[in-house]
Amino acid sequence: MLGVSVVALAGCGSESQSEWKRLAMPEPATKQGESTLALWQGAWIAALITGVVVWGLIAWVVIRYRRRSDDEIPIQTRYNLPLEIFYTIAPIMMVVVFFQQTVETQNVMLHRSAEPDNIVEVTAQQWSWAFNHGVGEVDYTKDEKGENDDDEFPYSEYAYVSGTGSDIPSLYLPVDRTTRFNLHSPDVIHDFGVPGFLMKMDVIPGRVNTFEVTPKTEGVYAGKCYELCGVYHSRMLFEVHVVSGEEYDAYVEDLATRASSEKPLIGGDYTRTQVGLDTEESAEHEGAAE
């Protein structure tokens, strides 16, 4: 079986071999995602080593102490104190190491920079997304973090893009720049995640959750909502375009000429409008409901 496995793996392409090295985890597109990949690989390696040791001990005991004749009774051992101590201490040490590595990775993924390069206000609502890019200078003292939304935002103007049930929005990010996401929800719990970033986070009404990414590779990545948020949850898709810094600046400047406001779209009349219906139709539905 080992020989067959070696021959089979030898026929894999470079992409397949890379997937084997990552143990089926996507290639991290951000610097922070590298920590998640390392934790994933380390956990699998530790689990495989533990499995090999346990399987080896089981096989050795089965062979070494097997019954050799019909009238033979194997030695009956009631207990083995050193072995029992080992079986108690070893799992505890493994759990401690796993916990320590997980906390270190969590600290990297949730690190909050004093002055990130960009701050994007992300709004998740039933059932699409709005992405608000800051225009002009940033005031970090007004950046949000806490239990509730407020009326102060780090930029004096925002260029925004929003999706509908039939229009998947695009989120543009600059490569090699740190972008902070401030996550808002006016209705139910959503979850903002990009598989290529190896990171996702709940979007909770009444609370502003945040995390940062530093994309390292240009490209297009799929994003979606990871929390079942209603009947059209499957429509909550978006695309992430990681582009050069110059292309990102040009995109935000052009977007500001087409869709901008003094404050980001994070609630109010906009989010009370049902996706797929215009304002008048929504008002009729609300009146009928009342």
Image (spheres, rainbow, N blue to C red):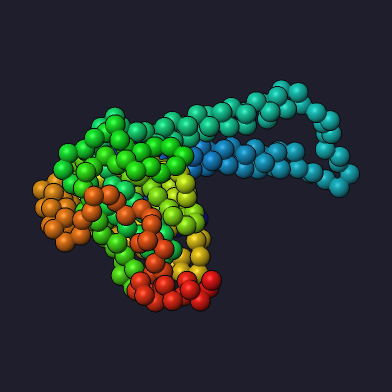
Above or below, comparing residue 17 to residue 278 in the picture: above
Near-viewer residue (172 or 51)? 172
Residue depicted at x 37% and y 61%: 269
Q: Is residue 73 left or right of residue 205?
A: right
Residue depicted at x 65% and y 25%: 89
Residue depicted at x 13% and y 58%: 257
Name the image quarter holding residue 212.
top left
Near-viewer residue (91 or 16)? 91
Near-viewer residue (2 or 237)? 237
Q: Is residue 230 left or right of residue 217?
A: right
Residue 125, x across and y down, in percent: 41, 59
Residue 36, x across and y down, in percent: 40, 41
Q: Is residue 264 left or right of residue 106?
A: left
Residue depicted at x 49% and y 54%: 189
Name the image quarter holding residue 4.
bottom left
Residue 183, x across and y down, in percent: 38, 48
Q: Is residue 71 visible?
A: yes
Residue 282, x across and y down, in percent: 41, 73
Outermost residue toward the right in this view? 71
**Mark count:** 0
Q: Is residue 9 visible?
A: no
Q: Is residue 181 left or right of residue 107?
A: left
Name the image quarter holding residue 186.
bottom left
